[in-house]
């Protein structure tokens, strides 16, 4: 049974093809102005990698911000449920999931089947999410993937960044730069600020091992290390944390299909 | 599932929590809420339950005065919920 999941996020579009329980292929593209087009692009890459065509896919579930506009999806499911399912796929022992995406972060607690037990999401503003890290990388003129490693190599000591709002934090960072604070120390402050923000969300849902981090910020070792320290647990991160939601969507697609086929077989 | 709808910002935490394990989807909360925050719909696991309307989750702190202040205008969402599925963080 071949199914697919498409996760149209605020900054990137992800598509995953699943053959029963086997991850066949996946695609990852930056989100453009047209969410339907982004979904198609991601799906095309996944299909190409898997040497498949869209008509071979029996069921498609969409998720993420743009989930309602994916033209080839038969069902849409919230990203909360998809991340729980996806995390459960990679780490069956997962009970607490932290998804740090482009514009929001979600704390989810799930059961042994990947069903959501408790969740909280902060999508009111993008402060401290992936987008704000991009803004800061741009401001300090360093590549995005260097933020994490450099934030762990302190020069004189962490510089406190108190503003939660990205716009205010940006002026705060600029002030630190003018005062000659080392870039690494500022980065440390930014990563620490993000970690304490998401920790508040995690506390709301309760923390239970095993702990999983998904989403693009899962690639930022500076934030991950600081979240781990606060939580007191080591984080499980799969080889590509950005596709976890799409994998969950593909599993929802498979489960929906199984449910649909069951009554037909019983007749 | 305990579904927390809302957000935390500089001014505080604004979450309305609905316990979908006890919610029977009767819709009384949706009927009495002065700000029409609630709706009853199937969730991702095909269970018909109350939820905060998706478009309103980012403004619950403004649209809802908080349980303590709304209580005077009975019936409020807590009072009409027979199973006690709804709680507020503020």
Image (cartoon, helix red, strand yellow):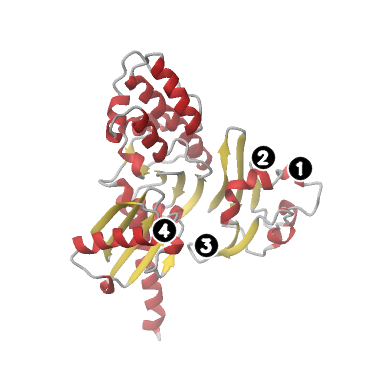
- Residue drawn at (41%, 58%) of the image: A63
A80 lies left or right of B51:
left
Estimate how packed mark 2 is, as few (under 14), some (14 to 19) or many (20 or more) residues with alpha carbons within 10 Å. some
Estimate how packed mark 3 is, as few (under 14), some (14 to 19) or many (20 or more) residues with alpha carbons within 10 Å. some
- Residue drawn at (47%, 36%) of the image: A127
Real-space Cα separation, disc 4 to disc 3, in angstroms: 14 Å
Residue B42 in which image quadrant: bottom right
Real-space Cα separation, disc 1 to disc 3, in angstroms: 29 Å
Residue A238: image location, x then y, percent: 28, 46
Real-space Cα separation, disc 2 to disc 1, in angstroms: 10 Å
First in sequence: mark 1 or mark 3? 3
Do pointers 2 and 1 mark residues of a single chain? Answer: yes
For disc 1, the marked residue is B69
The kind of secondary structure element at disc 4 is: strand
For disc 4, the marked residue is A63
Real-space Cα separation, disc 4 to disc 1, in angstroms: 36 Å
| Residue A117 - label | none
Residue at the far bottom: name it.
Answer: A267
For disc 3, the marked residue is B43
- Residue drawn at (43%, 60%) of the image: A67
Q: Viewer-proximal residue, A259 or B67? A: B67
Do pointers 4 and 3 mark residues of a single chain? Answer: no
Do labels 3 and 2 touch, CB within 8 Å? no
The subunit letter for the residue under badge 2 reads: B
Residue A84: image location, x then y, percent: 41, 52
């Amino acid at each position: 049974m071949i199914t697919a999941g498409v996760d149209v996020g605020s900054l990137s579009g992800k598509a995953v093809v699943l053959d029963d329980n086997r991850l066949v292929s996946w695609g990852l593209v930056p989100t453009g102005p047209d969410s339907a087009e982004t979904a198609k692009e991601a799906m095309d890459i996944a299909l190409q990698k898997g040497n498949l065509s869209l008509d071979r896919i029996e069921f498609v579930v969409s998720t993420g911000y743009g989930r309602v506009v994916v033209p080839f999806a038969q069902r849409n499911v919230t990203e909360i449920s998809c991340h729980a399912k996806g995390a459960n796929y990679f780490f069956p022992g997962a009970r607490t999931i932290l998804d740090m995406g482009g514009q929001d972060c979600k704390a989810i607690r799930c059961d042994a089947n990947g069903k959501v037990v408790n969740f909280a999401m902060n999508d009111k503003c993008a402060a401290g999410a992936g987008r704000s890290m991009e803004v800061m990388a741009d401001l300090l003129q360093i590549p995005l993937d260097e933020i994490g490693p450099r934030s762990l190599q302190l020069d004189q000591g962490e510089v406190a960044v108190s503003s939660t709002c990205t716009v205010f934090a940006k002026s705060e960072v600029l002030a630190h730069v003018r005062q000659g604070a080392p870039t690494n120390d500022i980065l440390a402050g930014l990563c620490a600020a993000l970690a304490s923000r998401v920790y508040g969300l995690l506390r709301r849902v309760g923390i239970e091992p095993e702990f999983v981090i998904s989403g693009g910020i899962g690639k930022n070792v500076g934030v991950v290390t600081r979240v781990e320290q606060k939580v007191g647990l080591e984080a499980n991160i799969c080889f590509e944390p950005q596709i976890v939601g799409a994998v969950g969507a593909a599993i929802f697609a498979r489960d929906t299909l199984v449910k649909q086929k069951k009554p037909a077989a019983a007749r | 599932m305990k579904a927390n709808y809302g957000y935390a910002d500089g001014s505080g935490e604004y979450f309305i929590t609905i316990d979908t394990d006890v919610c029977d989807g009767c819709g009384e909360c949706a009927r009495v809420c002065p700000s029409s925050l609630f709706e009853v719909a199937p969730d991702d696991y095909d269970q018909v339950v109350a939820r905060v309307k998706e478009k309103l989750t980012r403004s619950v702190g403004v649209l809802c005065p908080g349980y303590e202040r709304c209580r005077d205008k009975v019936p409020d969402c807590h009072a009409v919920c027979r199973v006690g599925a709804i709680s507020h963080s503020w």
